[in-house]
Image (spheres, rainbow, N blue to C red):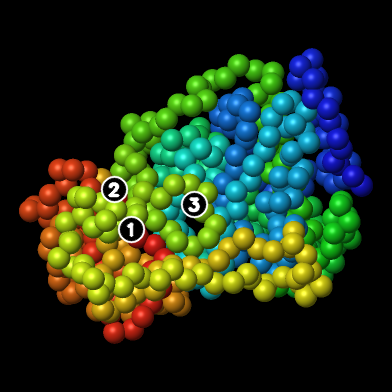
Amino acid sequence: MKLLFLLLPTVAARFDLTPINDFLKGLDDYYQHSPILENTWNNPMEGVGLQRLADKMKKDTFVIGVIGSSVAAGHDNCNYDSYERQLERTLQPIFEFYGKTVEVRNAGEGGGCGDSYRNQIWCVRQLVGDDVDVVHYSWTYFEAGDRTVNKWHETFIRWSLLLDSAPVPTIINVGEGGHGDRLYDHYKQFGYNTIFLQKGLKKQFPNYKKKWGVVGDGMHNETRYGGSGVMWRNWHPGPLSFELLSNALAKTYVEALKLSLTQKSLFHMTKMLSQADFPKPVFCDPKWCASEEPPGCVNYEQPTYGTPQIRIVTPETDDLMPYTTLYDETTKDWEYSINGLSRLIPRADRARKECQHLDHCAGYLSRSDSWTTFRLPRMTKGQIFVCCTTGKRCGDKMLDFDFVLDGHQIDHHTIKKEFGKCVQILDGFHSDMQDSSGHLYLAVRGGEEQVRISHVITL
């Protein structure tokens, strides 16, 4: 069954809700009038939260940003079948009818780079950009067994809302749900919600069980565009599971679009938020999540869609760079290194351009015989991390690195391994530190073993 159709926008047509109503009816018919899509959400998307989402659609381009692991990246599938690409294709014709466009930015990164929610949420600003209207977070498998997961979820929610565009935060979970969300009541007024890929399926088909390689969701044996009907490639969803997730999101977004066309805004669309707008933190670490801005970051992995707040400088590129004595005519630049295309694509699809994944592990290869210097943004909490992408535990390999900050070499005994792939070199400002210019400079020299530096993070 085809739900996509061409629509020709006119000024008069922008007040015609027929395309929206036809689309919603088509989805209802496609799922045989069952509430499977509504039940995929952990809580109903309604009230002020839905209105806030609708407000995001009053401008010309609706932007969705995605951060997450290999599930978000679409691994073991053709990228064309990822939920992000399906969602963009589903929404685009309807939004075009009303003179709008949709952009879905997939910054999902495979686990081979060593990343997890513990280090990636610090880089949400660079990963998706300061102009997103919605930001998705997807790290279900990494979170398994983590009793502190609410701490990280709340940190993600608050830092996302502190982006310039104050986007609606959404957690994407590939599980069945069945448990409450202890953060929902605190942040539902901002549109925050969780969607569970299998929750609606489990409610619709009580005997449903996730099995690798099985075709069909109980109602369909292929996607509506004729793609594979595999539900689970392995731990990664297949095209038909991704279609269910995409449709559940699309239904809510189209309902919000309808609301944006028929009702006045409750909030000014461009309103920036601050800590004063938020409830008191429940789980997250106050020294992190109480910041007035999201962290600063440079992430050399790909893709990213925003502007990094940190950059490499030399005496030639920055007159204020204070470490000129560390550089001479023998200094060698650190080399940028990037992995090739992912091979986690079904064999029959590997040559197809639209099937190629976007994510690449990348970074600068450390050197023990020369320094590189990073210009840091203004910090409020004095938190600095450096991360690598040479295995999930490569933070161990940076404990013997030399770091110079504010003219002082960091004592190796104070450097702590964090997040598996990172080291923390500063945990709060020292009384003698100077930040009068709004910028500090961090010089780094590699240790005994070469690693690839993927991130520098500050707060």
Q: Nearer the viewer, residue 157 or 90?
A: 90
Identify the mark at residue 312; answer none if there is no mark: 1
As helix, strand or loop, the secondary structure at mark 3 comes to helix
The quarter of the picture where residue 92 lies is: top right
Q: Distance between the residues labelled 1 and 3?
A: 18 Å
Q: Nearer the viewer, residue 243 or 305?
A: 305
Residue 167 shown left or right of residue 84 in the figure: left
The residue most toward the front is 329
Circle 2/circle 1 CB separation < 8 Å: no
The quarter of the picture where residue 411 lies is: bottom left
Q: How far apart are marks 2 and 3 (CA)?
A: 17 Å
> Visible in this render: residue 121?
yes
Which residue does the image show at 48% across and 68% down from the upper left? 362
Residue 108 shown left or right of residue 348 in the figure: left
The residue most toward the bottom is 448
Which residue matches tag 3? Answer: 127
Query: How far from the left and from the top, in percent, is residue 390?
Result: 44, 76
- The amino acid type of the residue labelled 1 equals Ile
- The amino acid type of the residue labelled 3 equals Leu
Query: How far from the left and from the top, in percent, is residue 452?
Result: 41, 73
User: Which one is earlier in the sequence, the residue at label 2 or at label 1?
Assistant: 1
Q: Nearer the viewer, residue 421 or 181?
A: 421
| Foreground label between 1 and 3 | 1
Which residue does the image show at 73% across and 66% down from the upper left? 77
| Foreground label between 2 and 1 | 1
